[in-house]
Structures are given as structure tokens and as C-alpha cells.
Amino acid sequence: MDYIWTPWRYQYMKEAASGNQPECIFCEAAARENDAETLIVHRGEKTFVILNRFPYTSGHVMIVPYAHVAELNLCESGTLDEMMQLAQRVETALRWLGTCVCTCCHAGSAIPTS
Ligand SMILES: [Zn+2]
């Protein structure tokens, strides 16, 4: 079995364990206005694209619905449409960099697409 060694995620794990994290990091980021600070790189009508502050690999981005849902099957069809359209755009951009593409719900589950 191979393991991804990501020691830079220790800061996130430490903060999460301390209980000093917002209830939902995605809702909190979406509500803030400073996209550079929250690492939001695109805002759509129903979803937004955010860089992972503690990525597993370089170029790790998430496409997140504004709706606070924990599973893709709880998203409205318009939200899913926009997620997939943005996933295509992100995938195209990231393929130039040779990195992976993931979609994500607020629960933090990720579905690698490549
Ligand atoms: Zn949320």
C-alpha cells in the first residue's frame, strides 16, 4: 500500500483537533468577501471553486456548492450541472499542469476524476 506523505497538513489537523475551526469551512469561506484570503478562485451561480489550503498534491482544488449539503445526491440538478461544467473547465486548466481534479461536498468527501 502506498501512502501520501503530507506533513504540511499537520497544521490543519492540529487546528481541527483544537475545535477552533468554523462549523463549516466551506460556508464560512463563501460568506467572506475576500476571495484571495479564502482561496476562492471562481464564484459561479450555485457553486464556487476553492483551492485546498492544505492540499494533498499541488493544484488540489474543490468545486463546492453554496448549499450546505454533505452528499452529491442532495444537490439540486442545476447545482450538479454547474459543478460538472466547472469540473470540465478546471480539468482542462489542470491537465496543463499534470495535476488531479476532484469534486467535493461539504462533508469533505472527494471523488477523484483522474
Ligand atoms: Zn457548509
Image (cartoon, helix red, strand yellow):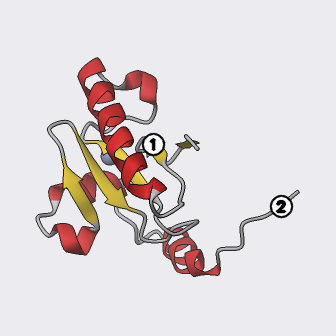
In this figure, which residue is indicated by the disc labeled 2?
2
Residue at position x 71%, y 73% in the image = 5
Q: Amino acid at mark 2?
A: Asp
Check the picture and name the quadrant holding the C terminus.
Answer: top right
In this figure, which residue is indicated by the disc labeled 1?
103
Asked if residue 11 lies left or right of residue 5, the reply is left
Give the percent coordinates (x, y) of residue 75.
Answer: 34, 26
- Judging depth in this view, the residue of 82 and 97 nearest the camera is 97
Residue at position x 39%, y 24% in the image = 74
Q: Residue furthest front?
A: 96
Check the picture and name the quadrant holding the N terminus.
Answer: bottom right
Q: Residue furthest right?
A: 1
Camera sees residue 14? yes
Give the percent coordinates (x, y) of residue 14.
Answer: 56, 77
* Marked residue nearer the N-terminal end (1 or 2): 2
Residue at position x 40%, y 67% in the image = 21
